Amino acid sequence: MWMSEPLTQALRECAPAEITVVKTAREFMEARRDSSTVSFVDDTTLPLLGTGETWPGHIIVVCDDSLQTAVSWLPTHPWLAHVVSSPMLQHPMAREHLGNVMATLTKEGAPRLLDWLGPTIAGRRIRLTHASKRVERLERMSEYLDSKGIGTRTVQLLRDAAEELLTNAFYDAPVAAGALDHAISRTQDVSLPDDSACDMVYGCRDDLAVVRVRDPFGSLNRARLVETLLRCSRTDGKVEVDETMGGAGLGLWRIFSVASFAAISVVNNRHTEFLVGIGKKAPGPRPFAFHMFWREGARRRFWKLQEENSSRPSVNHSVTIVPK
């Protein structure tokens, strides 16, 4: 750890592993690291790391400022993928959350975000092959969470997050993957094969509610995500629409803005997975954390429209996308 004394002490109390504290840039640079090393820095030490550097192991930045500030670091620090706010260190879920992140970072193979849910979360897992079925599923998700005693506000926030993730999965991801050559109306139905369905999980326990959506395209990249977050985090309200995807990207920004944590795992050209968690409200400022995992796929998966002559479907046309 290379952080201010208050944050160092806060992390000591919730860190799930043994820690070593360094006091100077030289100590940090000379510290021994490998793939199992996780380093922590904060707002004061991050600027001293440089903008284009790459580092062995993994780095988590503890942000003592706003989410907008954390997002502003992403373009100039291409290695930055993990940010935890200082209020998160005070939250009851801090030890569990950091344990999940560190276990994922140091484990071989593609991240498995479902492991973050643990045995105490009750929920449901379903597969969606038709975009037109998402409204019905969102209703059932809301009813389920409500029946488990989750507050109305949290249920609505998770429903909004799930709607955004499912919409991205059925409409934005196929365009980015090259299956469609232009954005299509959200009123059109999009269907996928049974073995390539969107995988959705939602659930809760007393202190946490989650939703997770995984699509089969793996077409989201860091550059596009960072551009979207930067564009939508403006405080002057002047957010421009991204015509290539048919929306401004505000839905993703809202997810980051309301989530206690948001984790993204992308295996390029294979799948994109989002996990969004909203914790029970605790005293003090709202905690936030975001984590991004990017990996190359073993082989690329190509997609096409089932109807070869439907590259520009009519408004009422149902689009069927299948692997090549």
Image (cartoon, grey):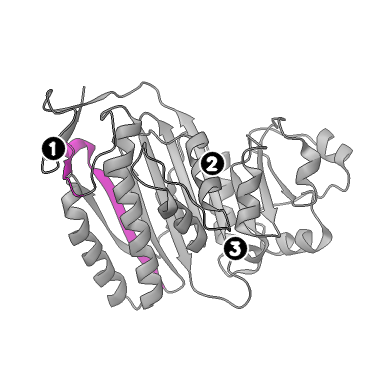
Judging by the rendered image, the residue that carries numbered circle 1 is 314
Sort mark 1 into few (<14), some (14-19) or many (20+) by Cα contacts within 10 Å.
few
Q: Nearer the viewer, mark 2 or mark 3?
A: 2
The quarter of the picture where residue 30 lies is top right
Left or right placement of residue 31 versus residue 198 in this view: right
Between 41 and 248, which is closer to the camera in this rendering?
248
Judging by the rendered image, the residue that carries numbered circle 2 is 226
Question: Is-magenta flag for residue 189?
Answer: yes
Q: Which portion, as a residue range, is magenta?
A: 187-205
* SS of the residue under disc 2: helix
Residue at image position (13%, 23%) is 308
Residue 94: image tag? 3
Label 1 with label 2: CB-CB less than 8 Å: no
User: Which numbered disc flags the more N-terminal residue, 1 or 3?
Assistant: 3
Q: Is residue 61 above or below residue 305?
A: below
Q: Is residue 5 above or below residue 115?
A: below
User: Which numbered disc flags the more N-terminal residue, 2 or 3?
Assistant: 3
Amino acid found under the numbered disc labelled 1: Ser
Residue at image position (76%, 60%) is 7
Label 2 – label 3 distance at C-alpha: 25 Å
Q: What x and y, as percent, mark residue 29? A: 82, 35
Amino acid found under the numbered disc labelled 2: Val
